[in-house]
Amino acid sequence: MKARTSLRPERALEEVAQCLRVMAHPVRLRIADMCLKGELPVHEIAARCGLPPHQACEHLRLMKGHGLLSSKRKGREVYYRVAAPHLPKLLRCVREECARRAQAEQR
């Protein structure tokens, strides 16, 4: 007899997998974590990540394109913030795993 999984329907699994693919990059995880604390302009995100602005913009465009972030223009600046309601939970899980690994390294 085949075991049934609670991970259904297929369309929802595809959407979750796509989110995980987009977020599977250290810079994008860092950007999302920063944006959880409030809106940030592109130049500040780039500086905090140690990236040139054009590289930060590529990460931001990808995340916005998948509905994870939203943006608004204020004058010449573009500000980004978290748009996906599930992103805080995902980042909490990532934070907990990072803390667990850091503790394991100290032992």
Image (cartoon, rainbow, N blue to C red):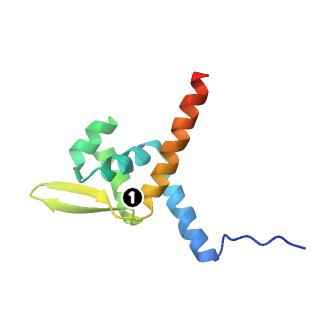
Q: Secondary structure at mark 1?
A: helix
* Residue 72 vertical placement versus 2 (above, below): above
| Nearer-the-camera pick, 44 or 61 | 44
| Amino acid type assigned to the residue bearing label 1 in the image | Met
Q: Where on the picture, by quarter, is residue 79?
A: bottom left
| Nearer-the-camera pick, 46 or 84 | 84
Q: Which residue is the site of mark 1?
A: 63
Looking at the rendered image, the quarter that the N terminus falls into is bottom right
Looking at the rendered image, the quarter that the C terminus falls into is top right
Report whether residue 51 is seen: no
Q: Where on the picture, by quarter, is residue 12?
A: bottom right
Residue occupying image coordinates x 29% and y 37%: 48
| Nearer-the-camera pick, 84 or 21 | 84
Residue occupying image coordinates x 34% and y 45%: 55
Q: Residue 47: horizontal and vertical position, in percent?
A: 26, 37
Residue occupying image coordinates x 78% and y 72%: 4
Q: Residue 24: horizontal and vertical position, in percent?
A: 52, 50
* Residue 101 vertical placement versus 64 (above, below): above
- The 10 Å Cα crowd at callout 1, few under 14, some 14 to 19, many 20 or more, is many
Query: Relative to 34, is 72 on the left or the right?
Result: left
